[in-house]
Image (cartoon, helix red, strand yellow):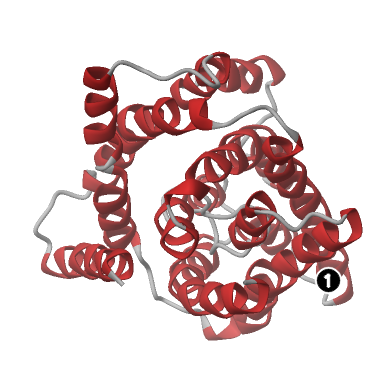
Amino acid sequence: MENFALIFAAIFLGYTAKRLKLFPEDTPAIFNKFVIYISLPAMTLLEVPKLTFSLDVLIPVMIAWITMFFSALIVFFISKILKFSKEITGALMLVAVLGNTSFVGIPLVSAFLGDAALPYIIMYDQLGAFIAVVTYGTFVASYYSSAVKVDIKTVAKRVVTFPPFITLLLALCFMGTTFNPLLTSVLSAFSSTIVPLALFAVGLQLNFKLPSHELKPFSAALTIKLIISPFIAFLACRIFGWDTLAAAVSILESGMGPMIVAGALATMAGLSPRLSSAIVGYGILMSFLTSAVLFQLIR
């Protein structure tokens, strides 16, 4: 209960601060950078070494890519059937496929499944969602918008120089290692900032402007992201016979709301900015309800 109270309080305070204009417009970007460059690497170094190498470690990564692959196919075919414009299709390829597996996923999934789920959440986020947004996301933005061009070298450089990714590789080298209590204490202090800061930043970025004439793609995007995606993950786990904590984490993570970075990428590329923002804003809030239902179904 305390975890959920913190989640809602942080988002509410962030949204209230936005409405009252208490912080500069670039505050969310600053908070997000702190989370990405400090909090998330600290949590990665703290939690990943607790894992022991097994199939469970790879389950979140496999489910992440399976879910995103089939979700993208569904978006593509629905866009063809409903005759969405190129810009709307590109926007949905981003916000209906890429989930908020870090800023919302970490606090929400750990609230449902406990701290033991954190290493698997990080694996899903870093080797799944993160790599997808800098590779698949960049490709989609460039393909559907003439404003952005594909640069394979730039994409590769982003992946291998991204601090949380470097930290993940380092943490994997220390699997099974127990750190010095002082180091553990420092890492724990920094990692504890991820929930309040990340969710406060989410509240600062929520946008609820819904274009009425874009209700159809809006509904399609949220149906795919919040219902179909976790169903794909659930089905994959059943097909492979995976019924572990790692599988539960993977299913819940696949049902997280749209990724804020994906919405920002769509906006930057000129892919239906208003629609993208509305999908991200409403999707994040709706994911609290849908993930609770999902948790009851898989527990």
Type of amino acid under label 1: Ile
Q: Position of residue 156 (x, y in %)?
A: 65, 18
Q: Considering only vertical position in the picture, is 238 above or below 137?
A: below
For the residue labelled by badge 1, is the local secondary structure a helix, a strand or a loop?
helix
Residue at screen point 59% across, 78% down: 296
Q: Is residue 226 above or below residue 138?
A: below
Q: Find residue 92 and report its image quarter.
A: bottom right
Q: Position of residue 145 (x, y in %)?
A: 67, 45
Of the 4 image quadrants, the one containing the N terminus is bottom left
User: Which residue does the image show at 50% across and 52% down from the upper left?
Assistant: 267
Side of 135 relative to 82 (left or right)? left
Q: Nearer the viewer, residue 38 or 5?
A: 5
Residue 278 in picture, x, y percent from top left: 48, 70
**Residue 296 shown left or right of residue 145 in the figure:** left
Q: Nearer the viewer, residue 121 or 54?
A: 54
Residue 163 is left or right of residue 19, and the answer is: right
Query: What residue is rendered at 12% in x and 53% in y?
Result: 23
Residue at image point 57% right, 80% down: 293
Closer to us: 130 or 74: 130
* Quarter occupied by residue 139: top right
Residue 52 image-quadrant placement: top right
- Identify the image quadrant of the C terminus: bottom right
Is 107 drawn above or below residue 58 in the view shown? below
Question: Number of marks in the image?
Answer: 1
Q: Is residue 123 left or right of residue 237?
A: left
Position in image of residue 78 (x %, y %): 83, 71
4 shown above or below 182: below
To which residue does mark 1 refer? 78
> Dot 1, crowdedness within 10 Å: few (<14), some or many (≥20)?
some
